[in-house]
Image: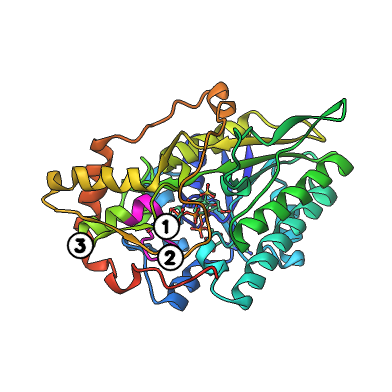
Amino acid sequence: MRVIVCGGDGFCGWPTALHLSARGHDVSIVDSLVRRQWDAELGTQSVLPIHPLSERLEKWRDLTGRVIRSHVGDLTDAAFLMDVLAQERPEGIVHFAEQRSAPYSMIDRQHAVFTQVNNVVGTLNLLYGIKDIVPACHLVKLGTMGEYGTPNIDIEEGYIEIRHKGRSDVLPFPKQPGSMYHLSKVHDSHNIHFCCRTWGLAATDLHQGVVYGVQTAETAMDAVLYNRFDTDEVFGTALNRFIAEAAIGHPLTVYGKGGQTRGFIQIVDTVRCIELALEHPASPGELRVFNQFTEQFSVGELAARVAGIAPRAGRVATVTHLPNPRVERDEHYYNAAHTALVDLGLRPHLLDDALLEDLLRLAIRFAERILPDKLLPTVRWR
Ligand code: NAD
Ligand code: USQ
């Protein structure tokens, strides 16, 4: 299959591009490389050193003989994007290319506006590009479990049957996003749904949970192929941050009571889910929603798991409860369906202590690159 991976230089996109290429798909990457600029803006860095995209692609070709093409440019630049679509004529587009940090979107007005413009306009351009240039192309869009928020009822995969005053319908599941970033994903979902209904486009919206882990079989092949490993308060996510904190003896930063429960997925399962979605495309006119996570945990539980295994790698980890910088429930009901990808063939890698220990040992190896003054939260929701 000819596939474009938008955001193919990022944490999920890079291992996905390699995974698809390794399985014989004809892959090209579109990325503006803006994520690397945000590291500079925030004065932070990936714990694993990441090589320039051109070097990564050259190394991949040298090691495997497989070519991944790259187009460096911005999805909000419609002329650039239309040109790439006309050149590549993809059968599938995987769209990771958004500003994905909730704290980044909550820094101030400018960052909120940037996040929503970047994400919503990029996705709109992609939708128009597909309609005008490659209408049969299947869009695989990365959404987020955070679109649903934490309702006091079970969360379904995208849609819910509602009975109201004697009538019933299957409607999009109610959305209660918790940041300007999460809101951008809801806006995207509505735009994609409209375009599928109106123009007959085929799309899959993958409502992904928090991703943890770092390497896949392909990124671990050579240091030049290493994936990024974010641990700072803005781009680091819960479990990977706890691992980095344990590696340098920093208390594990649980926000509030720690009862916040989310869906989690390993990076090795992320890449497989994308492959499954591409290989089983949505039908024309359909917006399919899959909840892409494998297990749910509270952040307090995860911190306790990391603290529990830390001594195996010679570390003692303590857990601290910080005042929550976010506005979110930290004790709540949470039960989300996630069977669609398993039905398509996903065999989940569940969180186990051996993986946690491997991750911790990796963080310890690169501990001098973990910046202690970037760990405590400074971005506040209020
Ligand atoms: P990332 O920031 O590491 O990668 C995103 C990539 O997109 C970067 O390389 C960036 O340069 C590029 N990009 C951003 N805006 C662009 C634009 N306008 N034009 C071209 N390129 C652009 O993020 P990630 O962690 O790989 O996340 C990828 C996607 O998956 C995001 O849409 C995110 O919302 C979703 N997601 C991520 C997680 C997670 O835990 N990482 C969880 C759920 C959903
Ligand atoms: N949290 C802590 N301590 C920390 C970091 C986070 O307690 O040091 C808590 C947060 O308050 C939150 C939960 O952990 O309750 C998850 O936070 P996170 O930073 O790990 O993840 P989040 O902001 O939700 O965003 C990440 C990705 C985003 C994706 C989302 C999936 O950055 O792109 O959309 O996970 S989901 O959580 O399902 O919305």
Q: Secondary structure at mark 3?
A: loop
Location of mark 2 (residue): 52
Gap in angstroms between the C-alphas marked 1 and 3:
29 Å
Residue 298 locus on image (x, y percent):
40, 43
Q: Quadrant of residue 78?
A: bottom right
Nearer to the camera, 347 or 328? 328
- How crowded is the residue under tag 1: few (<14 C-alpha within 10 Å), some, or many (20+)? many
Residue pointed to by mark 1: 56
| Dot 1 amino acid type | Arg
Residue at x 14% of width, y 53% of height: 316
Q: Quadrant of the N terminus?
A: top right
The tag on residue 235 is none
Which color scheme is applied?
Answer: rainbow
Mark 3 Cβ and ligand 2 under 8 Å apart = no
Quarter containing ligand 1?
A: bottom right
Residue 44 lies left or right of residue 80; in this view the side is left
- Magenta stretch, residue numbers: 229-241
Please give the name of the residue rendered at 59% of the width and 48% of the height, measured from the top-left corner: 149
The answer to whether the residues at label 3 and label 2 have Cβ atoms under 8 Å apart is no
Tell me how far mark 3 sits from mark 2, CA to CA. Answer: 27 Å
Looking at the rendered structure, the kind of residue marked 3 is: Ile
Of marks 1 and 3, the one in the foreground: 3
Q: Amino acid at mark 2?
A: Pro
Q: What whole-number distance in Å separates the C-alpha atoms at marks 2 and 1?
A: 6 Å
Q: Which residue is mark 3?
A: 248
Image x and y of residue 91, in percent: 70, 40
Question: Cβ–Cβ below 8 Å for labels 2 and 1?
Answer: yes
In the figure, residue 111 lies in which quadrant?
A: bottom right
* Prevailing secondary structure of the magenta residues: loop
- Disc 1 is placed on an element classified as helix
